[in-house]
Image (spheres, rainbow, N blue to C red):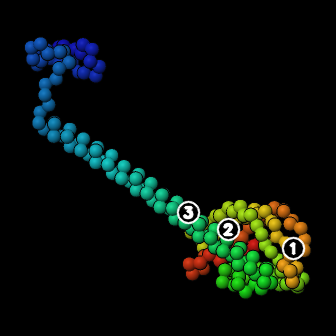
Amino acid sequence: MAYNDGNPGATPVEAEDAPAGAASWWRPPAPPEEKRRHFASVKVLVAVVVVLALVAGGLGVRAYLQHSSASSKQAAVRQAYLGWWTAREKAYLALDPSGLRGLMTPAGYKQESAQVQQQAATGDPFRLVADHNLQVAVYSGSPYASVDDVWADHSVALDPVTHQPVQPDPDTTIADSATLKLVRGHWLVGDLV
């Protein structure tokens, strides 16, 4: 019997089975049946790898689409909040909260309306001026979102006739949180904290 001479993993072969001059690790060619089985197992392995790649790719696409959807929801919440803020600025200047009604939940409107009416009792319009720093969170599987707004406040009361400031710019930082609710496809501002 001849043994492997430097080819790790080769099996010993009978010397008489090897052709003349062949290395001791030489094996005779595999019969056609064995080649077919080997080829079939390679095809199965390739198919498994392809399926795994497609599944992993599909999960990646789904994760991307979920992230994209979350990003668009956050953008919609941000837009709704800033639209509400613009209407709020007008409400305090006019001392009339009615422009906020379609942008807020009934509870939120009641809360904000009371604040506008409190300002109206002074007789002085109020100019809301803010530099916003927003953090938006949309809750998965829920019609709610929240906006944390740490804003630089430059709001001042105005003289009702001249509309000139009657107080200095406070230049303070305020942290507010607002809850928004998705109602019939529109984000409405709810309670404010």
Q: What residue is disc 1 on?
A: 165
Q: What element carries label 3?
A: helix
Of callouts 1 and 2, the N-terminal one = 2
Tell me the kind of residue under disc 2: Ser
Horizontal placement of 78 versus 5: left or right?
right
Residue at 67% in and 68% down = 146
- Amino acid type assigned to the residue bearing label 3 in the image: Ser
Spatial separation of the CA atoms under disc 2 and disc 3: 14 Å
| Residue occupying image coordinates x 16% and y 23% | 27
User: Residue 155 in the image: x percent, y percent?
Assistant: 82, 70
Q: What element carries label 1?
A: loop
What is the spatial separation of the Cα atoms under label 1 and label 2, in whole angstroms? 32 Å
Secondary structure at badge 2 equals strand
Residue ID at (13%, 38%): 33
Q: Residue 70: where, in percent of width, then height?
A: 55, 64
Residue that badge 2 annotates: 146
Q: From this viewpoint, is residue 119 visible?
A: no
Query: Quick one: label 1, few (<14), some, or many (20+) residues within 10 Å?
Result: some
176 versus 18 height, above or below? below
Q: Nearer the viewer, mark 1 or mark 2?
A: 1
Closer to the observer: label 2 or label 3?
A: 3
With 175 as the anchor, is 49 left or right in this view? Answer: left
**Coordinates of residue 98 in the picture (x, y in percent):** 73, 86
Label 3: how many Cα within 10 Å (few below 14, some 14–19, many 20+): some
Q: Which mark is residue 71?
A: 3
Please name whichever residue, 149 or 10, is drawn nearer the observer in this view of the structure: 149
The x, y position of residue 92, in whole percent, is 79, 79
